[in-house]
Image: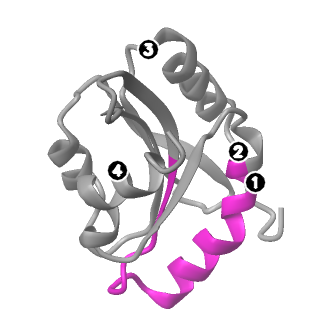
Amino acid sequence: MASGVGVNPDCLNAFQELKLGKKTRYIIFTLSPDNTEVVVEKKSESHDYEQFMADLPENECRWAIYDFEFEKPDGGRRNKITFYSWSPDDAKIKHKMLFASSKDALRRSLVGIAAEIQGTDYSEVSHESVFEKVSKGN
């Protein structure tokens, strides 16, 4: 924990729910108001990727987990649990640094992630862009 930030147990519970329950489609994480721990900001059952992108703030950092479902070329369906580091260009530098130094605490506590996406603008987290990354080798 380079930043000294902890991970709230609710984060792990929400992740297990997504991974095992298959009801939750995505989770958005943020820092607590006092910047001492990672907390769940939102959980959603929505399959609408545009809604997920809309939930990523334009000028604030977040982390997210998305259960990314896609069609394989042979017609089969696949799911890949994908971790997002959202750090928009317009976010405050101090905020970006705190999120960057706190990422590993969260990332290491979530076991079962298949892909990782870094995003500084919406084009980098677009459905097409993420599909390209997660579908390689499938």
Q: Which residue: 77% across, 47% down?
A: 108
72 or 13: nearer the viewer: 72
Which amino acid does the dot numbered 4 rest on? Phe
Answer few, some or many: residues within 10 Å of disc 3's Cα (few below 14, many 20 plus, some between 14 and 19): few
Main SS category, magenta section: helix
Tag in front: 1 or 4: 4
Picture coordinates of residue 100, whole percent (x, y): 63, 73
Rendered image: mark on residue 105: 1
Q: Kindly identify which residue carries mark 3.
A: 22
Which amino acid does the dot numbered 1 rest on? Ala
Q: Earlier in the sequence, mark 3 or mark 4?
A: 3
Rendered image: mark on residue 2: none
41 shown above or below 35: above
Which amino acid does the dot numbered 2 rest on? Val
6 shown above or below 117: above
Answer few, some or many: residues within 10 Å of disc 2's Cα (few below 14, many 20 plus, some between 14 and 19): many
Q: Are marks 1 and 2 in contact (CB under 8 Å)?
A: yes
Between the residue at mark 3 and the residue at mark 4, the CA separation in whole angstroms equals 19 Å
Q: Kindly identify which residue carries mark 4.
A: 131
Between the residue at mark 4 and the residue at mark 2, the CA separation in whole angstroms equals 28 Å
Q: Earlier in the sequence, mark 1 or mark 3?
A: 3
| Residue 32 shows in this picture | no
Between the residue at mark 1 and the residue at mark 4, the CA separation in whole angstroms equals 26 Å
Magenta-tinted stretch: 83-107
The quarter holding residue 102 reads: bottom right
